[in-house]
Image (spheres, rainbow, N blue to C red):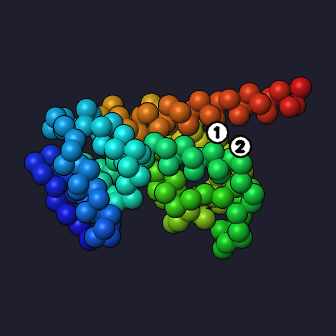
């Protein structure tokens, strides 16, 4: 289900209860109509109120910071994912994190999340992707300046990936 919202080019997708909840919360926000300023406001509301509906601002998804960070940490601490036609990896990836990786971070979809894991099969590959995406750029630098919600997430994913890399080097020594 889809609902257009207000004058700020916002669309909400999801089940009717999720859309209703998101609409009620968006009604309480003071939005400016400037996307790069509004995205963090919406992101904060998504996280604070645990909004499950998909909120798009001018056609681009606004992402939950808490959910992406939680899913990324879980992937790094998870057991191997199930075998698929694409092979298997040494981590499990949520659909939400997979969508973020291929829609915002400089990766193609690789058909589905198992195809993505087949391309990046290890936790080290996942961490390294955050430091250098498929276009040879650090994910943070790849994301456009106006996607302020995604930049905030990428900054933290870079920090987590870099600190894990240091841990691995310390284990080798």
Q: Relative to 87, does residue 60 appear above or below in the rendering?
A: above
Residue 144 in sight here: no
**Outermost residue toward the right in this view:** 173
Q: Which of 64 and 20 is in front in this view?
A: 20
**Quarter of the image holding residue 149?**
top left
How crowded is the residue under tag 2: few (<14 C-alpha within 10 Å), some, or many (20+)? some
Return the residue at label 2.
124
**Quarter of the image containing the C terminus?**
top right
Q: Which residue is drawn at 74% across and 60% down?
A: 80
Q: How far apart are marks 1 and 2 (CA)?
A: 6 Å
Residue, x 86% and y 31% (percent of image)?
171
Q: Are marks 1 and 2 in contact (CB under 8 Å)?
A: yes
The residue wearing badge 1 is 128
Outermost residue on the bottom side: it is 85
Disc 1, SS = helix
Where is residue 31? Give x, y as percent: 19, 38
Relative depth, front residue between 68 and 134: 68
């Amino acid at each position: 289900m889809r609902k257009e919202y207000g004058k700020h080019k916002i669309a909400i997708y999801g089940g009717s209860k999720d859309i209703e909840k998101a609409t009620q919360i968006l009604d309480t926000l003071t939005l400016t109509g400037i996307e790069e300023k509004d995205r963090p406001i919406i992101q904060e509301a998504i996280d604070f109120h645990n909004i499950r509906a998909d909120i798009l601002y001018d056609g681009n998804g606004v992402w939950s910071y808490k959910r992406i960070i939680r899913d990324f940490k879980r992937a790094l601490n998870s057991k191997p994912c199930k075998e698929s036609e694409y092979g298997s990896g040494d981590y499990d990836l949520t659909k939400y994190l997979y969508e973020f990786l291929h829609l915002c971070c400089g990766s193609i979809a690789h058909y589905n999340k198992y195809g993505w894991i087949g391309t990046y099969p290890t936790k080290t590959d996942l961490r390294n992707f955050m430091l250098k995406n498929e276009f040879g750029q650090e994910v943070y630098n790849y994301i456009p300046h106006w996607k302020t919600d995604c930049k905030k997430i990428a900054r933290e994913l870079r920090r987590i990936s870099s600190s894990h890399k240091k841990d691995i080097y310390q284990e080798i020594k």
